[in-house]
Image: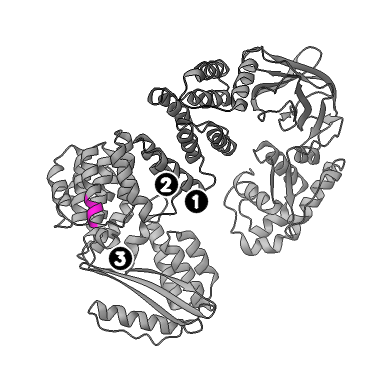
């Protein structure tokens, strides 16, 4: 496919595996008429022998003169660093490649690559136009004018047709559709290029059908994929299916066309075509739980319930977290009268994802019409409605289940019937009230460190137990916190809060509120309200004190922000809450001063801001307590809560990007 995209006569790809004592190269050579695979093995101490063997065989197969390098390859030397840099450049990591080359011992090859990388960043000429054209595509963002300049020069040196495609695409990207059209129209017969020209003409409102017909008559996989993708984007399903079916004919072991055809078939309510495509997909990729899940669904739509269950079970065997397969399994078991087993499947699905899949509910609603004699469908539907907190609809379905028992084609156990009756009574009864326990505490950070009195700027976490005398607490509540003095509200927050299923008592201690930095010292009221959409609520009022002063350490610990020194040791912990700002500032300033020598070697001169004109070492040496204080105030204003990091990295970023 890559060879067809480039239009090259041959394309070589592969991988290298490093074994205990050997190096194994897996090489694929793709030609116009055939593809070949080769495995080359050599002693791990002699990679050059592997290179010589591979080059000899591949050049012979391509009818080229054999080149024997007879060179030593030592990847533990500077040559290995050069290869690392070359690999980074190949992946488009130009800046990382330059950094690697700057840090290594200079060699001719390294200097050549470094010169090319530095030239491409600014669009300068270099004597390898092919290399420059490819590297220019890795710039972030891509500069179309720079890339076009390189590709224009490259085009004068090669007949490789993909170069014209890049000229066309880059012209189109910069808004010059007339030039792009000119490039596309200059493409000689080259199926992938014709396919992209058709896609371009589709967008431009020009004739594209003739080009698509040409491609659809060919056996070029890349071109057919391009036509399929363009048709998909244009919502031209007929053309997309035609291209995909051609792909299944010429590449019967390529799974993507079968996958895509199955999705289209589902969209068109064509269960037979979906099942046919997926039957091939699971043969090609038998470890795909997605394909087995979808195959099970297609069988359900066809009414082949035993095969539907088998396919769903296989998907779950491959991936125990395949919750959609579990929903499908629950459906198949429900409509075949095995309600206990169905509820087990639904239970597992909901345990994996408490958000009930809307389609699972919709499928049961449809099943009521498809299998009217199966009373158990009402039970399963009630079960899912209840999980979605649709109490009235759940009660209605439990009642319908009980009413349908006399005429049901299936007998259900006394346990299930009793459970349905019990759930119906619970759903029809008034919702039970809930309460906040008398003891509400306040703490700093997620650990809930009790450290009264509290101070302005600290993040506090109220902790309390919510409980009920009924069957369970509501699953979803609104959690409202208000802090006020004798007259005015100081601050407040409102969040939606979820409570686990079947809880009758639950400790809520993970929601915080920030004491404003300008809060006055004094006594305050903490009012907590938990409410539900059906009008139930519980209220708790308690008092606490805000003391004078602000502490950097208390604010950091309240936000669960922990900083480490260069040796990865923490500067502070919860036991240091009462240490002064001066102690923390002195610790951090000492760290900065101690790292001045390292900063001199690693940090380029500062161009702007508070430390403009200084070298890295000068900046670290010149830092003062005031700088540390400004940094800490900045840090506390960010969203760095619940984080751990090296102090020096964060300080450096602040010094270079923020400090003015």
Pointer 2 and pointer 1: residues touching (CB < 8 Å)? yes
Q: Position of residue 257 (x, y in %)?
A: 30, 49
**Residue at point 65%, 17% (across, down):** 426
Do residues under tags 2 and 3 come within 8 Å of each other at their CB atoms?
no
Residue located 73% across and 49% down the image: 563
Secondary structure state at the residue bearing disc 3? helix
Give the number of the disc on residue 292. 2
Would you identify the image quadrant in which residue 218 lies?
bottom left
Residue carrying label 3:
130
Binning the other alpha carbons within 10 Å of mark 1 as few (below 14), some (14 to 19) or many (20 upward) gives some
- The reply, left or right, for residue 212 in relation to residue 389 is left
Could you tell me which secondary element the residue under label 1 belongs to?
A: helix
Q: Residues within 10 Å of mark 3 (few under 14, many from 20)?
A: some
**Nearer the observer, disc 1 or disc 3?**
1
Report the front residue among 659 and 429: 429
- Residue shown at 19% from the left, 65% from the top: 159
Residues at marks 2 and 1, CA–CA distance in whole angstroms: 9 Å
Whether residue 478 is situated above or below residue 17 in the rendered picture: above
Magenta residues, start to end:
246-250
**Residue 327 image point, x, y percent:** 49, 36
């Amino acid at each position: 496919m890559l060879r067809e995209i480039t239009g090259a006569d041959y394309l070589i790809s592969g991988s290298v595996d490093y074994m205990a004592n050997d190096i194994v190269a897996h090489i694929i050579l793709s030609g116009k008429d055939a593809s070949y695979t080769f495995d080359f093995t050599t002693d791990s101490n002699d990679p050059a022998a592997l290179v010589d063997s591979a080059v000899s065989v591949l050049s012979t197969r391509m009818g080229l003169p054999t080149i024997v390098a007879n060179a030593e390859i030592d990847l533990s030397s500077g040559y290995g660093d050069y290869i690392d840099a070359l690999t980074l450049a190949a992946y488009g990591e130009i800046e990382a490649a330059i950094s690697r080359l700057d840090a290594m011992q200079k060699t001719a090859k390294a200097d050549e690559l470094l010169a090319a990388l530095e030239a491409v960043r600014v669009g300068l000429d270099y004597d390898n136009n092919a290399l420059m054209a490819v590297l220019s595509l890795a710039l972030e963002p891509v500069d179309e004018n720079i890339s076009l300049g390189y590709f224009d020069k490259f085009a004068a040196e090669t007949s490789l047709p993909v170069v014209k495609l890049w000229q066309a695409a880059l012209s189109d990207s910069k808004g010059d559709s007339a030039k792009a059209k000119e490039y596309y129209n200059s493409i000689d017969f080259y199926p992938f290029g014709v396919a992209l020209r058709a896609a371009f003409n589709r967008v431009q409102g020009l004739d594209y059908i003739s080009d698509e017909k040409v491609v659809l008559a060919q056996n070029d996989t890349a071109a057919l994929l391009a036509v399929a993708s363009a048709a998909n984007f244009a919502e031209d399903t007929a053309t997309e299916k035609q291209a995909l079916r051609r792909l299944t004919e010429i590449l019967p072991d390529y799974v993507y066309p079968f996958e895509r055809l199955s999705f289209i078939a589902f969209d068109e309510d064509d269960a037979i075509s979906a099942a046919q495509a997926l039957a091939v997909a699971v043969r090609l990729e038998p470890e795909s739980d997605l394909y087995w899940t979808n195959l099970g669904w297609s069988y359900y739509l066809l009414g082949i319930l035993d095969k539907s269950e088998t396919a769903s079970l296989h998907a779950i065997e491959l991936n125990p977290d395949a919750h959609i397969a579990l929903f499908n399994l629950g459906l198949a078991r429900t409509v075949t009268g095995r309600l206990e087993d169905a509820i087990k499947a639904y239970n597992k699905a909901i345990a994996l994802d408490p958000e009930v899949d809307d389609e699972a509910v919709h499928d049961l609603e449809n099943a009521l019409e498809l299998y009217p004699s199966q009373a158990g469908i009402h039970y399963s539907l009630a079960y899912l409605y209840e999980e979605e907190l649709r109490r009235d609809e759940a009660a209605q379905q439990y009642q319908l289940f009980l009413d349908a028992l006399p005429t049901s084609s299936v007998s259900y156990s006394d346990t299930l019937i009793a459970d349905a009756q019990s759930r119906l009574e619970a759903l029809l009864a008034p919702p039970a009230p809930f309460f906040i326990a008398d003891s509400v505490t306040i703490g700093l950070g997620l650990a809930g460190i009790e450290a009264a009195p509290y101070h302005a700027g600290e993040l506090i976490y109220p902790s309390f137990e919510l409980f009920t005398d009924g069957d369970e607490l509501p699953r979803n509540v609104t959690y409202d916190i208000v802090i006020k003095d004798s007259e005015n509200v100081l601050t407040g927050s409102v969040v939606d809060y979820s409570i686990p299923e079947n809880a009758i008592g639950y400790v809520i201690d993970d929601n915080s509120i920030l004491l404003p930095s300008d809060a006055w010292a004094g006594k305050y009221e903490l009012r907590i309200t938990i409410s539900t959409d059906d009008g139930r609520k519980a209220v708790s009022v308690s008092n606490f004190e805000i003391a004078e002063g602000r502490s950097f350490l208390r604010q950091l610990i309240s936000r669960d922000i922990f900083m480490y020194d260069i040796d990865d040791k923490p500067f502070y912990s919860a036991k240091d809450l009462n240490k002064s700002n001066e102690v923390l500032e002195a610790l951090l300033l000492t760290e900065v001063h101690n790292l001045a020598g390292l900063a001199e070697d690693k940090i380029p001169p500062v161009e702007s801001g508070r430390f403009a004109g200084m070298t890295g070492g000068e900046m670290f040496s010149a830092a003062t307590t005031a700088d540390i204080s400004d940094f800490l105030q900045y840090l506390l204003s960010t969203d760095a809560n619940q984080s751990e990091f090296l102090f020096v990295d964060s300080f450096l970023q602040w010094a270079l990007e923020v400090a003015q």
